[in-house]
Amino acid sequence: MEKALELFLGVLTAVGGFVEIGELTFSLNAGARFGYHLLSVIALGTVGIIVYCEMAGRVAAVAGQPVFNLIRERVGVSLGAVTLVAALAVNILTCAAEIGGIALVWQLLAPIPYRAWVAVALVFLLVAVWVLPFKWIERVFGLGGLLMIVYLVVAARDVRDWAELLAGFIPSAPKLESTSQYMLFAYYAVALLSSVMLPYETYFYASGAIEDKWTPADVPINRVIVIVGFTLGSLLAVALVSLGVTVFDPLHIEPQVPGVAALPVALAFGKAGLLVALAGLFFAFAGAAIETCLSGAYSLAQFFGWPWGRFRGHASAPRFTIAWIATFVLAALLIASGVDPVTVVEYSIVFSVVILPLTYFPLLLVAGDPRVMGRHVNGRLSSWLGWFYLVLVTITALAAIPLLVLTHGGRG
Amino acid sequence: MMRLTQLLRIDIVDEDGKSLGSLMELRARAAAVRGRVRKHVQLDTLVFGAPGLLEHMGVREASSCEASWKDVLRVERGRIVLRRNAHKRIA
Amino acid sequence: MKRDVFDIALELLDHEVVDADGVPCGIVDDVELAGEPGKPLRAVALLIGPGTVADRLVWPFNVLVRRFVGRSRVRIPWRDVRAIDERIALRRSAQSHGLGDADRRCARLIARIPGSAR
């Protein structure tokens, strides 16, 4: 019974935690610019994150090893150091973007200066992680993110052509006017894939499995949570693309700020709908801010062998504690410095995909190593999918920065 | 006193100067390591070869040779010199 | 799956070290070897600490580690190793092995904040 509840809550938490500011921004814009054509990329990315989070959770449950320990053991200390520095930089960028998102959402409710809201968001996040046990952090922000379902409801209501939407899951490009438009399409494909498969998700998921003290008996639960949870969560991303098609394209709005996403919900359900929509964004962004921050602290502590984890208590994992506090503070300072939050989002998404191959490769090796995994070693399907996605993210990683440059940061 | 990381990837040559590969591993008998606590662990065997990137990462088993530490003549800066014909292929 | 050989680079180097209470207290950053041609080659100690890691890294990572993480090097004699598995277990607490000094200093700082026992 307890396991059934854990499974149910685990699935819901995975759904509510699926969307973050990068995914939101790129999904809305993808729909507004390119119709339903990029839904296939969301589907592709969702399968990829399922494959790798399943592996990460399984390795954590069986070997008791989180991702960064494996990185150092398998690819050595030099490449591990490169991965660590890159992961920390990307985590701070992403965390900064999420904090900026929270401030922008709150600014819609009360016209207090943006920087003041950033400071409030920082204090809120510090207190939340300080006071709440890990399980509560997961549940509160994961389940709060379920308020995003209101977007799914509005999107489903507004779809004009279901056949066109479903056709979007078949990989295809729209008819575009110029090469630069096709490059922009490719850039969006890369960005959407990256936003669904962000590296901090595997780090956080694996470390979270150890925080929750998973054992080999939890391997089946792990599988159900990732498959059901992430598939349902991806429907939220699909809904955002659809809103881009049905609401923003006809109005010729390029949704630049996250609060604009709440517009369709406000149009459909009035003030109550708007509040629910904004609350959903808040929980999604706050949850992602916490995950990216803790993920960075986990990586640093695991690489150097420091005691880590909220389950130990702050005073028993002191350097880990200082690491996550410092991450929140640095991220808040970055976003408060005046840099455009949408630009920070873009850079965080692009640089995330560049480090993805370094994250996935050691995980794939360990999950496929019978000496470590015993009978829980990768089966044929996991192995094939694992290698397929490793090749895919490597190609995407190589294309990401050139595309960012050639499309002038996604402006076309 | 030597450190393991100073020896790993060091060149292995025979006494005629012929290159045999680079040091990939130092091996002990498992029984000497697991079980009772000991004051030290004796490393009997050098494993060496010419591993490529995939072998370094553990994707593929490297084709390699082994030799006994007893057949090491000298440890010089940057290389280990083995007795002629002391090594054998293992994979 | 236990094999009948023990490969020191694969199974020891860069593996996590835990103390007698199971608390992580470092990574095996290097291994001290003693011996020369004609005499047995032995692994006699584990070397742990950011100073040791930095020695294995190129610029700028070695500088970054020494500056932001530390320079300490701790030598754990082999007889203080209790068990070798996925993790390396030591015989006593981290403190008695000379490990975890930085954590203890940081813990004093953290302890000043209310609720730090949570």
Image (spheres, coloured by chain):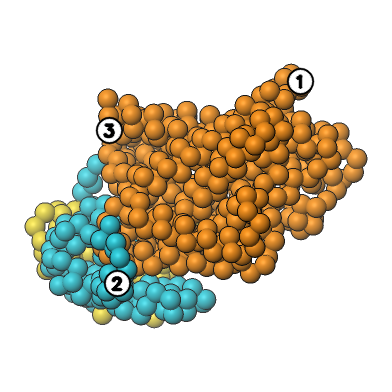
Chain colours: A orange, B yellow, C cyan
Residue A278: give x, y in percent of width and height.
60, 43
Looking at numbered disc 2 in the image, what kind of residue is underneath it?
Arg
Q: Chain of mark 1?
A: A
Identify the residue shown where x is 55% and y is 46%.
A282
Q: Compared with residue A96, is residue A388 higher up or lower down, i.e. above or below? A: above
Outermost right residue: A177
Q: Chain of mark 2?
A: C
Q: Nearer the viewer, residue A18 or A404?
A: A18
Q: Nearer the viewer, residue A67 or B90?
A: A67
Q: Is residue A318 left or right of residue C64?
A: left
Looking at numbered disc 3 in the image, what kind of residue is underneath it?
Ala
Can you say which quadrant of the picture contains the N terminus of chain A? top left
Residue A68: give x, y in percent of width and height.
41, 55
State which mark lies toward you, 2 or 3.
2
Give the labeled residue for mark 1: A161
Q: Compared with residue A311, is residue A157 higher up or lower down, i.e. above or below? A: above
Label 1 sits on a secondary structure element that is: loop
Q: CA distance from mark 2 to mark 1?
A: 60 Å
